[in-house]
Image: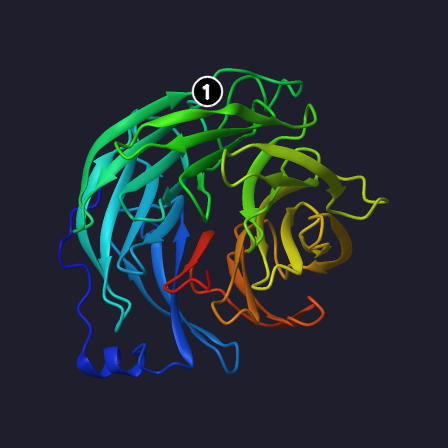
Amino acid sequence: MYRSLGILIFTVIYSTAFSQKDYSNIYFYVSSFDEDHLSGIALYNLNFKTGEIVYLKEFGEEINSDYLAIGNNGGYLVSVAQEEGIKSGLMTSFSIDKESGLLEYIDEFYTDGHGPCHVAIDNKGNFAFVAHYDEGVISVILRNEKGELLKITDKIKHTGSSVNKDRQESAHPHMVYPTPRGSFVLVPDLGMDKVMAYHLKSNGRLKPTKQKSLDLEPGSGPRHIAFHPNGNFGYVVNELNSTVTAFTFNKSNGSMTIIESKRSVPDDYSESNYLADVHLSRDGRFLYASNRGHNSLSVFKVDESIGGIELIDNVDCGGDWPRAFNISPTGDFLLVANEKSDNIVVFRLDEATGMLTKLGENSDFPAPRCIKFLISYR
């Protein structure tokens, strides 16, 4: 459990050297869950000119982190993890000093669900959402303007299964995704082969939309979602059958319709592969997905008129098991967290062609799982 209120003390020289006033640099945070390394959040710096990343500091003494979320325009960060011996996830809230990147502990809160794998904050910063993979539960937690975690406003348990008896014996929500516009919340459930759809009420309750869910191919295993910048198209990566499904989204009522699904690895690849993360370029012309097993980044071209996608490249991720990645606020760098090879790899992203070129890597922090930039480009 996180106990320290005064996590870090930097000298004035150190803080100034990496100040966000130097607009060629920006901070990003990396989570880790490693039994042999208890500090689960690290601070890095990315140089926008060179693509160099520099490891700065770890936060905490006895914390692991499965996933991170940043809200309130970079004012706060929350982390979620499973605390050993406790039948509930633990969420920890921090304030962010934007000048130095420092995190200051605010409080912690039990999420009332086992096996948390994802955390998100709504667009207004009022609520945090947690997906509990093991228990099939999503929780909604009220926050105040100080970043304090106050109470659980709703808890929903999914029930269902699908055809993969090893992985889909019960419901397994893998992400809670507040849509960029409006007050809808989408939950890809790997165990049910569904994307569940809810409307977030002002009191923090989730009400199922009229459609309730987007039903995917049996055995697909939906994991993570990203939206096109226009808000009309969504994309879900399916962990178990290595496909990306494009769908339309109605911003007025939350309804969804499948456009098409495309394989994320070459047709002649027959070994095990598990899709993990998905993001789009700033202009929405290209979509990227990470493949664990094939150990690559899929590059898709997006048909912006109808939302369809076409696989145009697979790029070696530069390590093993690319669990997560993210695109820099400038849009021209892509960073990959390779969990099993303990490295973060930097690619130059050509916004004109969508192509990726490896620039370098850093291996100062073990088992990286999630990357969040202090400032988002959306």
Residue 334 vs 338, above or below: the answer is below
Residue 3 vs 359, above or below: the answer is above
User: Tag 1: Cα neighbours inside 10 Å, few (<14), some, or many (≥20)?
Assistant: some
User: Residue at label 1?
Assistant: 158
Q: Residue at x 42, y 82 (%)?
A: 24
Q: Residue at x 37, y 49 (%)?
A: 68
Residue 135 vs 20, above or below: the answer is above
Judge by depth and name the residue closer to the eye, 56 or 37. 56
Q: Residue at x 68, y 35 (%)?
A: 258
Q: Residue at x 63, y 42 (%)?
A: 275
Left or right of residue 241, residue 5 in this image: left
Work out which quarter of the rendered image holds the N terminus and state it. top left
Q: Position of residue 157 (x, y in %)?
A: 40, 20
- Tell me the amino acid under the disc marked 1: His
- The answer to whether any part of residue 61 appears in the image is no
Q: Position of residue 291 (x, y in %)?
A: 65, 48
